[in-house]
Amino acid sequence: MLSPEENDLLTRVGPGTPMGNLLRSFWMPFALAAEVPSPDSDPLRVRLLDQDLVAFRDSNGTVGLIQNNCPHRGASLFFGRNEEAGIRCVYHGWKFNVTGACIDMPNEPAESDFRSRVSATVYPTREHGGVLWAYLGATDRLPGLPELEWTRVPASHRYVTKRIQSCSYLQNLEGEVDSSHVSFLHSRFAPDAYANTQALSLPDYMARDRAPRFYVQATPYGLQIAARREAEADSYYWRITQFLMPAYTMIPAPPGGPISWTGATPIDDGQMMGFTVTWHPDRPLTEQEVAEIESWTGVHTEVDARTFKPVRNKDNDYLLDRALQRSRASYTGIRGIREEDLAVQESMGRIFDRSSEHLGSADLAVIATRRRLLSAVGALAERGSVPYETEHPETYRVRSAALVLPRDVAWDRGAADAMVARV
């Protein structure tokens, strides 16, 4: 468990907080590129790391991320006119470009040079893999964008979704690195269904062995988390999750199939944006693979197209079907994997009090992830140590893995080739 002070340290993300400072050292995904689809399209409200901002794509196609309040009298620039390479406040017509420079001040005399002495706070943005990323950190450095494989494949090879989740980013992140819950929360079968089966498919191993053994290995980008389950008499089934700093994961995937990545971006202390990407490194996703995603039974969730709030949410109890739950066809009675995660993560409250927990050996990955974050927060706060990953974006060139290995083969050696990104 964490002390109340450590819990606060990891969950408070506003300006000037230690965790907020750490997150601001990284590029953070904050919107789908399609949310500001074309030059001079509608401005977009953005709340990111407890800051209210406005995104807009200017006449040249460049995305700007600017403070919400006009530097003049504080009116929201969300209501602004996005035109002629800048966003114009509708209150008095002051206009700012993507660099924050005031390029027009029509309510001042023509001979005035006042506009040259006024600027708005803006943050660097990049369009990367169909997602908009922002850097809210120190102005004397600009880290490299993480070289994630899915950002480097053609758009036809990936499927990207976003959702708004009503809890701290840490509750989602801890769920993603926890491989033991999969045998319960996401179970679709009766617990004893495979008691006498000799040869099982990969998902079936999780139904038969519900108490995996965990192994954690530090990496330059975060952690590799291996969960070992019994397979056949001479083999183990391994699920290897990647935790990538500061709040990204890769869901274990069998070699040769699509791979999935998740990102948890804090909106503020008690809300987050969840990004999920499924991609194939070598080919476009097939119609069947897209249809499976859009069945909304997996790691992507169906959302309201305007608000990005999940259709199945805490206000409607995630459309829980008790009859389905009693039938043992579904452990939860909730339709999709992502909705099941939402139900348990949001049910903890916006910020869970981790000082009340009772952690066991199955929580090794959760403990290791917290320690990794606490270490990075401390290094930045106490010594000014910039996170290694931000200066070495190539370290993100990895994949996850789910595979069966002989019992005498070490998991990190046996899965090494499968976990290398090649795009």
Image (cartoon, rainbow, N blue to C red):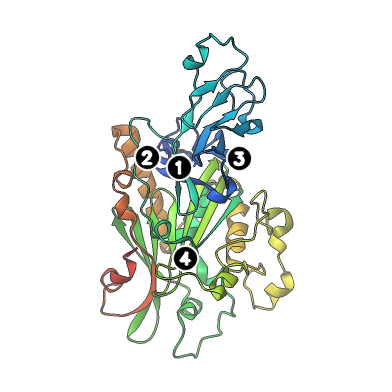
Q: Residue at x 62, y 18 (%)?
A: 73
Q: Residue at x 30, y 80 (%)?
A: 407
Say if residue 222 shows up in the picture. yes
Q: Residue at x 38, y 76 (%)?
A: 403
In which quadrant is the C terminus drawn?
bottom left
Mark 2 neighbour density, 10 Å: few (under 14) some (14–19) many (20 or more): many
Q: CA distance from mark 2 to mark 4?
A: 35 Å
* Residue placed most toward the observer, 314 or 82: 82
Q: CA distance from mark 2 to mark 3?
A: 31 Å
Mark 4 neighbour density, 10 Å: few (under 14) some (14–19) many (20 or more): some
Res 421 → quadrant: bottom left
Position above or below: 2 against 381: below
In the rendered structure, find residue 69 and report the number of the disc placed on it.
Answer: none
The residue tagged 2 is 377
Instruction: Give residue 288's position: percent from left, percent from top.
Output: 56, 75
Q: Amino acid at mark 4?
A: His
The residue tagged 1 is 10
In the displayed structure, does residue 366 sit left or right of residue 216? Answer: right
In the displayed structure, does residue 23 sit left or right of residue 388? Answer: right
Which secondary structure lies at badge 1?
Answer: helix
The residue tagged 3 is 44
Q: Earlier in the sequence, mark 2 or mark 4?
A: 4
Q: Earlier in the sequence, mark 1 or mark 2?
A: 1
Instruction: Give residue 109's position: percent from left, percent from top.
Output: 59, 9
Marks 2,4: beta carbons within 8 A: no
Q: Earlier in the sequence, mark 4 or mark 1?
A: 1
Q: Amino acid at mark 3?
A: Leu
Q: CA distance from mark 1 to mark 3?
A: 28 Å
In the displayed structure, does residue 190 sit left or right of residue 304? Answer: left
Foreground disc of the pair 4, 1? 4
Foreground disc of the pair 2, 3? 3
